[in-house]
Amino acid sequence: MSRVQNIKGMRDHLPQAMLLRQHILTVITRVAERYGFEPLQTPVVEYAEVLEGKLGDEEKLIYRFEDHGGRRLALRYDQTVPLARVVAQYGGTLALPWRRYAYGPSYRGERPARGRYREFYQFDVDIIGSGSPLADAEIVALLTDALTELGFPGFTTLLNHRQVIGGIARVSGLDEEAAGGVYRAIDKFDKLGADGVREELLRAGVQAAAADHILALVQIEGEPEAVLAALTEQLAGDARASAALENLRAIIAGLAAMGVPAERYRVAPRLARGLAYYTGMVFETNTPHWPEGSLLGGGRYDELIGQFAGRPVPTVGLAFGIDRLHDVMEELGLGPRALATATAYVTIFNAELTGASLALARELRAGGVNTLIGLDSHAGLGKQFREADRKGVRYALVLGPDELARNEVVLKDLRTGEQRSVPRDEVLAALGV
Ligand code: AMP
């Protein structure tokens, strides 16, 4: 017997959910195109070796399988590694810097939880082939515009730099290898808190004094300028960290010049971001309404594409987590008031008048109005109004014998209950077209 059940961690999205998701997609696409980003689509399946060796610890979450020809394949884990393959494969034909966006599902063998799925959709934006801090700033400006247009209240983007954490590890007396353990421990800060991270560091072999020093530095908070000033002083002996702080300063100057409101971002040295391929700025955006995880995350990865292309291609980008945005918007009741594809419902008054109603529906569609029709010429008007209302349609139209004779249509606003007769040639205008 087959099970009538979807796979755990992979969701079905019924129409009301899909309409909200499509709204999210439309808004983000509009914002990305406003900044001149171009679309890219790649397959969901890649050769396993394309994905392997790029993700660090996360690699264990990749879904791998063999196809009928015995090839080792994998479901993509994100849309970043496939992008790197594309840049290497079509290198000569792509004019850099290239701004691309991509939308689609990614797959990770995670333990499913609230907001964490095995199949989830990401919307990525990346600027390929530029190391300019203006590129970093543009990505953050874009995400700020997108979340603002979606109506998110009170979101904050936390900014950091891989070499700030590296510097913190080094000035605390750790070598390069031990610094890797520091990233992993710090990455769990929001989950474990300071005490939990301290234990993780000790477990990774970090001395107690060094662990305390690291913890003191990663917890520096305040206005961006103040945090940068404090870190500059603390990390003065480390050239790479000093350069990273200069870079963050330039990015923040870019943000201000691009009009990103100051309350929308913070410098947070505790932000690590799990993925192994980041080399520069890293960031994620959170909202107090969703403590379980970030709405989106990203950063600069100047070496990943080089692993495929054999030459460095500096790149910065982010992935919006569409499922997170969807879950939070659903919970907060954000998004359009009515989620429906159709705005008009043309009723069928009776069997003889079916043709006249179908002609009216055709007229409305030709005028650009999404229109549903009643399918049952024996159903009463009340039943058809109820159906229209259930579908979230705003207007029901009635064409009875009297209206037909007077060349009019009855227009009923299902939201207010108000009903009036409208001359046939004014119907489109009455529907706001
Ligand atoms: P990452 O690709 O890990 O940098 O994640 C970028 C964004 O994708 C996160 O901020 C989340 O919003 C989303 N995301 C990552 N993993 C999952 C998952 N398992 N389920 C749902 N959303 C996810």
Image: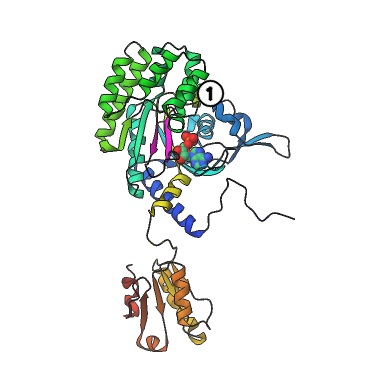
Determine the secondary structure under disc 1: helix
At horizontal 31% and vertical 34% (from top left) the residue drawn is 265
Residue 164, compared with residue 358, is above or below; it is above
Q: Find residue 40 and report its horizontal and vertical position in percent.
A: 48, 41
Quarter of the image where the C terminus is located: bottom left
Q: Find residue 95 and report its horizontal and vertical position in percent.
A: 43, 32
The residue segment tinted magenta is: 283-302
Q: Which residue is mark 1?
A: 307
Question: Could you classify mark 1 by the number of other residues whose Cα lies within 10 Å: few (under 14), some (14-19), or many (20 or more)?
Answer: some
Residue 107 relative to residue 146: left or right: right
In this view, the residue in front, 49 or 266, is: 266
In this view, the residue in front, 165 or 93, is: 165
Q: Is residue 13 visible?
A: yes
Residue 300 relative to residue 145: left or right: right
At horizontal 40% and vertical 18% (from top left) the residue drawn is 214
At horizontal 58% and vertical 41% (from top left) the residue drawn is 44
| Quarter assignment of residue 53 | top right
